[in-house]
Amino acid sequence: MKLAVCINHVPDTAAKITFAADGKNIDKTGITFVLNPYDEIAIEECLRLKEKNGGEVIAISLGGDVHKETLRKALAMGVDKVVLLKDDSPRDSSSVARGLADYLKEISPDIIFFGKQSVDSDDAAVGTMVAEMLGLPSVSVAVKLEITNGTAIAEREIEGGKEKVQTALPAVFTAQKGLNEPRYPSLKGIMAAKSKPIEEKVPAAAQPKVEIVALRKPPSKSAGKIVGTDASAVPELVRLLHEEAKVI
Amino acid sequence: MKIIAVAEQRDNKFKKSAFEVVRTARTLADQTGGEVIALVIGSQVQAIAGELGGYGAQRVLAVQQPKLEKYSSTAYSKVIAEVVKKEQAAVAIFSATAMGKDCAPRVAVKLDAGIGSDCIALKVEGENIIATRPVYGGKALTDIKILSAVKVFTLRPNVFPTGMSNSTAASVEVADIPLTDSDFTSLAVETTQASGKLDVAEADIIVSGGRGLKAAENFKMIEDLAGAIGGAVGASRAVVDAGWRPHSEQVGQTGKTVSPSLYVAVAISGAIQHLAGMSSSKYIVAINKDKDAPIFQTADYGIIADAFEIVPVLTQEIKKLLGK
């Protein structure tokens, strides 16, 4: 089974975001970048599918040289091969998807995995766009996956419940938290990853279809009201919610 | 300019977010001299589709076939793209629900269009529509412009108004979009609804508990408060990781993003990743015994006290107010 997983290098979710002078980018100084948390779950699912079915797992990332750090994390977890599609020009979801799809078409995987979204852009679009570009079926936000005889049954989260989706293979899946618990890389894996090769290719240039006009702070909230410090404050809280906020 | 408003239905009922999409399309159309065409897909949707007229759709298209009863990523996106092309529409708007977020990217690729996902505002500026969307888990906002001829937007649920329906029933045109089996390569085969519980992603009031509740059993008072106030139960990541509550209740960066009218955070400290999930709530109440908990900086109203002291009293007072 040939498994491909597309991964991204993103600011840690605990990072404090500050803004660059151009008003369109974040200030990257002092920010720790990590493997996108949902992609970690995607890698884990591919490793488990390989352990069950045999085959190989290839991790791919599109971006600048810094993405190599994240590709090494994938190697440390146990993927067989990693590829950097090297381009550090700004790309939107559709141009990232195009770069990944072009490469994935060459290698023809049986299963392609993504995290459900990157925690920087939060677009949740690339995985499904790649599926469309490759003419493949897909299931997004998968919390469970079973593969039997070339058919996949995935469970995905929907409002108020779950949906079971059937697809033939090859197919694209995007991983949601709960699909699995990713393994910690072993020390041996981490050491070995340092010297494994990273294949590099240059993707074709693709024009972004979305332009960022501004990147800014959300409007700050004015200070709230501390209504009290014991149970005697409760009636006043209820009154405020009813009469002032009018939400109950 | 024609705007296709994709109105989601499940089990032949419109979600509130469908009305939000139609109303938003109407607002854009009014500002640009455009026309709103609402689109409903399913197996027997002609009967319900007319309701969309009340929210501002000038025309309503129903595409119905037995095989479309359940959602199919490949088939639904084909239908929507075909309609956009037939109508030569410039804009397609979806709600950023599970269905919309799955379908819109495919439609965007089919139409060679850029996509603005999970938007919280859309503004007409001259020739352009500027969309505002949260990024970095809501720690920042971007204003974006889509450069392609066709533009696709998904709207964060519960942020855009539906307005009041003026009860105009629009006449429904049944549109024929031919589909074959090969269009259904991914197909939902079964949907299970969590029995009775209101989903955090769709609730207008959420009562959420954090690790300060100390044990899974103590969530009973959260459930009681949620029941009294008519809300859903939410949970912080710590509580889900500890196995006290299911992941479907998790609010936060690796859980659900919610925008209720009222979010009550009980014994939740307010870590950045939690705020990422609920900061677009209209009103936030925090109950926490730690006066330095970061949640108090985001809350509109707070009580600095032990949750065990406050929550049962709050449930009583709510019941009194609501005459229960």
Image (cartoon, coloured by chain):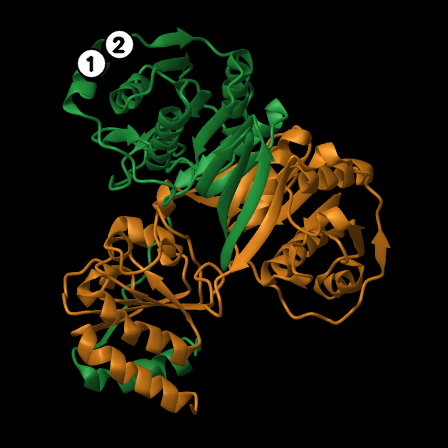
Above or below B125: residue B15: below
* Position in image of residue A35 (x %, y %): 31, 29
Report which quarter residue A19 is drawn in.
top left
Q: Are marks 2 and 1 in contact (CB under 8 Å)?
A: yes
Name which residue lies at 66% across and 28% down.
B112
Q: Which residue is mark 2?
A: A196
Q: Chain of mark 1?
A: A
Label 2 SS: loop
Judge left or right: residue B27 versus residue A35: right
Above or below B176: residue A2: above
Distance from disc 2 to disc 1, alpha carbons, whole Å, reads 7 Å
Report which quarter residue B284 is drawn in.
bottom left
Q: Residue B284 or A216: which is nearer the viewer?
A: B284
Shown in green, the chain is A
Residue at the extreme front of the image, as rendered: A149
For the image, the number of numbered tags is 2
Label 1 SS: helix
Q: Residue B120 or A71: which is nearer the viewer?
A: A71
Q: Residue B286 or A24: which is nearer the viewer?
A: B286
Above or below B124: residue A191: above
Quarter of the N terminus of chain B within the rendering: top right
Label number found at residue A192: 1
Q: What amino acid type should be assigned to the residue bearing mark 2? A: Lys
Q: What amino acid type should be assigned to the residue bearing mark 1? A: Ala
Report which quarter residue B260 is drawn in.
bottom left
- Colour in which chain B is shown? orange
Q: Residues within 10 Å of mark 2 (few under 14, many from 20)?
A: some
